[in-house]
Amino acid sequence: MDQAETRSRYRLLGLFSLALAASLYFAFAAVQGEYGLFRRAEVKAEIMQQRLILDALTAELEQMENLTTRLSDTFLDLDLLDQQARDILGYARPNELVLD
């Protein structure tokens, strides 16, 4: 084996090692990195959780809009008005018995 052949083998080994290290780095980044697979799974879980919160808030908003509409000037629900007066003001009729 002459010196040129040995140098060529070391150069090839160095290039192979460098390519292997770069491949391992990029594989690790693809799984663990800021935009990797694990982060993607975390983001999907967070999106699902936020959608549940959004659905709950949307339902609450619809309920409040319904109550507001039922107590508006154009549409007055007397039963709801009576219920609100009892709850907020502590209103009771003279012939009713109130238990605490």
Image (spheres, rainbow, N blue to C red):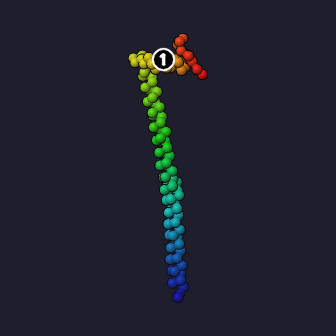
Depth check: 13 or 69 in front? 69
Say if residue 72 shows up in the picture: no
Q: What's the residue at 53%, 58% (across, down)?
A: 32
Q: Which residue is nearer to you in this view: 23 or 67? A: 67
Q: Residue furthest left?
A: 74
Q: Residue furthest right?
A: 100
Front one among 56 and 84:
84
Q: Nearer the viewer, residue 29 or 39?
A: 39
Q: Identify the residue at horizontal 44%, vertical 26% (top origin).
A: 65
Residue 83 is situated, as x and y percent measured from the top left of the image, at 49, 20
Residue 100 located left or right of residue 66: right
Q: Specify the amino acid type for callout 1.
A: Asp
In this picture, is 1 found above or below 28?
below
Quarter assignment of residue 59: top left
At horizontal 51% and vertical 80% (from top left) the residue drawn is 8
Numbered circles on residues, count: 1
Q: Which of the 4 image quarters holds residue 99? A: top right
Residue picked out by circle 1: 82
Give percent across and percent down for residue 28: 52, 62
Residue 92 in picture, x, y percent from top left: 54, 15
* Residue 79 percent coordinates (x, y): 45, 19
Q: Quadrant of the C terminus?
A: top right
Neighbour tally class for label 1: few under 14, some 14-19, many 20 plus, Cα within 10 Å: few
Disc 1, SS: helix
Q: Residue placed farthest to the top in the image?
A: 94
48 shown above or below 81 = below
* In this picture, residue 12 sits left or right of residue 73: right
Q: Is residue 30 visible?
A: yes
Picture residue at 49% right of the left edge, 59% below the top: 30
